[in-house]
Amino acid sequence: MKTNVVTVLDIDFVNKHFDHVIDDLLERISNQQKSFIVTANPEIVMYAHENQDYKKIIQSADMVVPDGYGIILASKILSTPILERVAGYDVMVRLLERGNEKQLKIYLLGGREETNQKAVANIRRNYPHLQIVGSHHGFFDWEKSTVTADIKASCPDMVFVALGFPKQEQWIAQQYDEFSKGLFMGVGGSIDVLAGEVQRAPQIWQKMNLEWFYRLISQPTRWRRMLAIPRFLIEIFQLKLHK
């Protein structure tokens, strides 16, 4: 059995407190270890459960963090409780904070061009010692674009990829062997929050584990994606019954 890991529907989640996760990631960066980080919520786990190629990509990651209360709830139902939720947005922000202290290099990939530029401007303002060595919007031809070459040439310590799932994890997996160093992490809609275009749920909603509901009422078009949550819980209860 792996240590500090809890398995939910064949996905191994790191089972550490938030600060320990950040310390591990910074240590990998300091040692110039290449890292693929996935922040997985029930939607991502269900997509992986139903798409074997995507599941293999998630399973290949160096670390999968439990982003979403549904993952925590599932781990409790399965009698293998995860210590705490490790939200992807919080991981990204803490890495930006610590990267600012260490003057690390970052590359921001994804979002609309305007959104990407706003996010870059806000990062520069809030984290003035970070080195933003490059950025690019998320609408590009994977096969013909120079994005991979640009990232390689800029040698970033961290690459935040905001293409939305499953594309961001698929892009990282496809290009991963091209790089010799760097932390690669899919950050999805977090770029919209960084850009100031979307507000994150207030703390009270987060503490009540209702951030998903806040996102739904703030962005009603997400309702189809949210249907993955009840399907996920049905799978978890079936798994519990057959244990």
Image: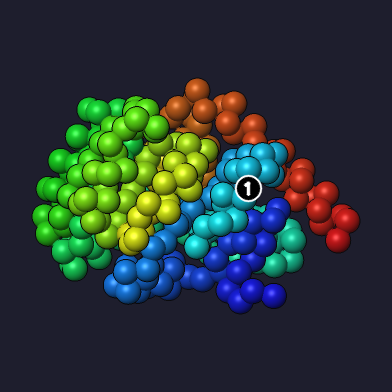
Kindly identify the residue that appears in the image at 50 percent across and 23 percent down: 221
Kindly identify the residue that appears in the image at 62 percent across and 61 percent down: 12
Query: Which residue is more in the foreground, 17 or 218?
Result: 17
Q: Residue furthest right?
A: 242
* Residue on which disc 1 sits: 55
Query: Which residue is more in the foreground, 111 or 56?
Result: 56
Query: Which residue is more in the foreground, 171 or 233?
Result: 171
Q: Residue furthest top?
A: 221
Figure check: 221 above or below 54: above
Q: What is the quadrant of residue 33 in the picture?
A: bottom left
**Number of disc labels:** 1
- Direction from residue 36 to residue 15 in the image, left or right: right
**Residue 232 seen:** yes
Q: Quadrant of the C terminus?
A: bottom right
Q: Quadrant of the N terminus?
A: bottom right
Query: Which residue is more in the foreground, 174 or 61?
Result: 174
Figure check: 142 above or below 104: above
Three-letter amino acid code of the residue under disc 1 = Lys
Crowding around mark 1 (Cα neighbors within 10 Å: few <14, some 14 to 19, many 20+) is some
**Residue 186 seen:** no
Kindly identify the residue that appears in the image at 79 percent across and 50 percent down: 237
Q: What is the quadrant of residue 36 in the picture?
A: bottom left
Coordinates of residue 219 in the picture (x, y in percent)? 45, 27
Coordinates of residue 241 in the picture (x, y in percent)? 87, 55
- Direction from residue 24 to residue 52 in the image, left or right: right
Kindly identify the residue that appears in the image at 26 percent across and 47 percent down: 151
Coordinates of residue 94 in the picture (x, y in percent)? 31, 60
- The colour style of the image is rainbow
Figure check: 192 above or below 105: above
Coordinates of residue 173 in the picture (x, y in percent)? 48, 48
